[in-house]
């Protein structure tokens, strides 16, 4: 498996292997219950080996790629739409996959990568780059699904900001929020001024905190008077 191709092996779950009790039994066997739905077909309940799914989840690209799921020898093209994890231990407990239909557009959340932070003039001026999104929902054909969206912030000065509409999109890809009638072209990143800690001039200062050269108990004046 490469980061450009993800393939999972699964088995069809019979009716008696569905439900909460059955799911718990599957997890004890290191199997993850899952479902494949959509594509004008009946949903298919499946189970996937835990270690195989965990290995795939290590790659960010897994969440924005067309996946191949082999179910008892039959291939399904799908994308992952939901993943339930254990609240404390973090391992996957259930996964939902949506079938891909050729020529039919899909809605997917893809990661956003901000590049050029260190080269930005605002960074050189001690500004603080504040990123406000980690992923964005896009609409496109399966063949046009990007692995991620890149936002170049290398030219940002203090006070600059980028909105959703500033993202350079691949051909055939649109941002779902901007397609809505009441959609909002919200800010995704801005360069804020440096944070300056205010000092209270009236605050009491402990003598032990003042450097010795600044402490004067009058000894030098007494010497001069002698």
Image (spheres, helix red, strand yellow):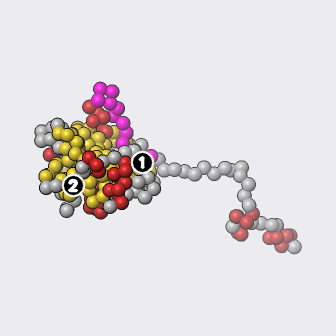
Comparing 69 with 21, the one in front is 21
Residue 189 is covered by the magenta coloring:
yes
Answer yes or no: is residue 175 visible: yes
Comparing 214 with 203, the one in front is 203
Element type at marker 2?
Answer: strand
Which label sits in the foreground, 1 or 2? 2
Element type at marker 1?
Answer: strand
| Region rendered in magenta | 180-192
**Residue 130, label in figure:** 1
**Residue 194, label in figure:** none
Q: Around disc 1, counting alpha carbons within 10 Å, would you say few (fewer than 14), some (14 to 19), or many (20 or more)?
A: few
Comparing 28 with 136, the one in front is 28
Q: Is residue 18 left or right of residue 88?
A: left
Q: Position of residue 125 (x, y in %)?
A: 43, 53
Residue 10 is covered by the magenta coloring:
no
Answer yes or no: is residue 119 visible: no
Q: Position of residue 194 (x, y in %)?
A: 48, 50
Compared with 177, 193 (above or below) is: below
- The disc, 1 or 2, on the residue closer to the chain's N-terminal end is 2
Compared with 55, 143 (above or below) is: above
User: Which residue is drawn at the image coordinates 54% and 51% (left, top)?
Assistant: 196
Q: Quadrant of the C terminus?
A: bottom right
User: Which residue is drawn at the image coordinates 20% and 40% (left, top)?
Assistant: 42
Q: Around disc 2, counting alpha carbons within 10 Å, would you say few (fewer than 14), some (14 to 19), or many (20 or more)?
A: some
**Residue 11, label in figure:** 2
Q: Position of residue 211 (x, y in %)?
A: 69, 67
User: Which residue is drawn at the image coordinates 83% and 73% (left, top)?
Assistant: 223
Q: CA distance from mark 1 to mark 2?
A: 45 Å
User: Which residue is drawn at the image coordinates 26% and 54% (left, top)?
Assistant: 47
Pointers 1 and 2 in contact (C-beta within 8 Å): no
């Amino acid at each position: 498996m490469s980061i450009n191709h993800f393939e999972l092996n699964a088995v069809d779950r019979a009716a008696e292997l569905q439900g909460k009790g059955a799911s718990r039994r599957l997890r004890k066997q290191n199997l993850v219950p899952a479902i494949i739905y959509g594509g004008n077909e009946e949903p298919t309940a499946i189970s996937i080996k835990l270690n195989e799914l965990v290995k795939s989840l290590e790659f960010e690209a897994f969440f924005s790629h067309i996946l191949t799921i082999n179910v008892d020898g039959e291939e399904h093209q799908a994308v992952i739409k939901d993943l339930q994890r254990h609240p404390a231990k973090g391992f996957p407990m259930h996964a939902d996959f949506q079938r891909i239909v050729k020529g039919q557009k899909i809605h997917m959340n893809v990661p956003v990568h901000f590049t050029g932070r260190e080269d930005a003039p605002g960074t050189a001026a001690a500004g603080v780059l504040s990123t406000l999104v980690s992923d964005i929902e896009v609409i496109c054909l399966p063949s046009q699904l990007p692995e991620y969206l890149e936002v170049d912030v290398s030219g940002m000065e203090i006070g600059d900001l980028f909105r959703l509409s500033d993202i350079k999109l691949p051909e055939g890809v649109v941002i779902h929020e901007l397609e809505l009638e009441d959609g909002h072209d919200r800010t995704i990143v801005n360069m804020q001024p440096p944070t300056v800690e205010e000092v209270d001039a009236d605050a009491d200062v402990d003598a032990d905190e003042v450097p010795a050269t600044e402490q004067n108990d009058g000894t030098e004046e007494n010497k001069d008077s002698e």
